[in-house]
Image: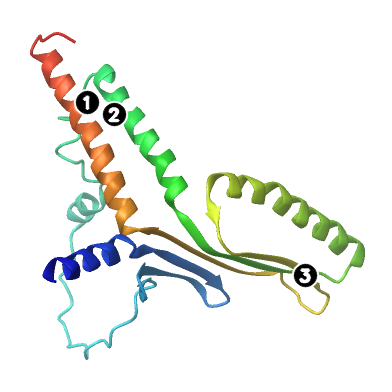
């Protein structure tokens, strides 16, 4: 019976959705991390109650030389010690990374894509032209997005409002990937990176290809 519980837990973890939800509205941008049914905000960070400020002594005035020295850019001591590796060893790793990104975008799911554009203007002719341009741009963009990503739900609207002085936009994007798919990608491409690394190590030791 215990192994059934363990198996059920593993299955639930494998289908657990992980991702992010980004919203832009009149309050600004907001980003939340998604972990199953749990969502927690990471941007903007919620302001903490600031403690009462204590009186601090004013720092002593610096002389001109010290002031110039403090404002001058500081060189990173490791900058001059950086040495590149062989491009022949690097390119196989780049290919693995590109394959992983290509595989990743097919496994990502856009659960919700919303755009509500309200165009403002008092000139009907200009507004009609801009309205047509907006729909043309959306018509060109959406097929490209759907080609690269799986979009489950989308709601894109363009409207006009002659009473507004400024064009506004509301946008929302919810994107997730299951934990099982993420682990599968990590294992598969981690193995490929390790294999390329061992090949490079063998070649540097003078081994056969």
Q: Residue at x 17, y 87 (%)?
A: 55
Q: Residue at x 21, y 89 (%)?
A: 51
The residue pinned by badge 2 equals 93
Quadrant (top left, top right, bottom left, bottom right) of the N terminus: bottom left
The residue pinned by badge 3 equals 159
Q: Earlier in the sequence, mark 3 or mark 1?
A: 3
Distance (Cα) linking label 2 and label 1: 7 Å
Q: Residue at x 41, y 41 (%)?
A: 103
Q: Earlier in the sequence, mark 2 or mark 3?
A: 2
Classify mark 1: residues with Cα within 10 Å, few (<14), some (14-19) or many (20+): some
Contact? badges 2 and 1 (CB < 8 Å) = yes
Q: Residue furthest front?
A: 1
Q: Residue furthest right?
A: 125
Distance (Cα) linking label 3 and label 1: 53 Å
Residue 174 falls left or right of residue 71:
right
Residue 146 falls left or right of residue 74:
right
In the displayed structure, 91 sits above or below 176; it is above
Quadrant (top left, top right, bottom left, bottom right) of the C terminus: top left
């Amino acid at each position: 019976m215990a192994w059934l519980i363990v198996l059920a837990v593993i299955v639930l973890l494998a289908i657990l959705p992980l991702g992010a939800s980004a919203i832009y509205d009149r309050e600004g941008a907001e980003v939340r991390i998604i972990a199953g049914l749990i969502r927690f905000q990471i941007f903007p960070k919620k302001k903490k109650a600031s403690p009462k400020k204590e009186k601090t002594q004013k720092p002593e005035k610096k002389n001109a030389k010290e002031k110039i020295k403090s404002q001058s850019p500081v060189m990173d001591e490791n900058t001059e010690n950086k040495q590149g590796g062989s491009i022949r060893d690097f390119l196989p790793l780049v290919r693995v990374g590109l394959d992983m990104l290509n595989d990743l975008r097919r496994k990502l799911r856009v659960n919700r894509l919303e755009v509500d554009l309200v165009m403002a203007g008092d000139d009907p002719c200009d507004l009609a032209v801009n309205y047509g341009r907006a729909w043309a741009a959306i018509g060109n963009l959406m097929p490209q997005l759907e080609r690269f990503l799986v979009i489950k739900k989308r709601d894109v609207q363009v409207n006009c409002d002659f009473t507004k002085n400024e064009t506004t936009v509301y946008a929302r994007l919810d994107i997730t990937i299951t934990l099982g798919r993420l682990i599968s990608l990590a294992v598969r491409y981690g193995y490929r990176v390790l294999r390329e690394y061992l090949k490079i190590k063998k070649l540097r030791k003078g081994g056969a290809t």
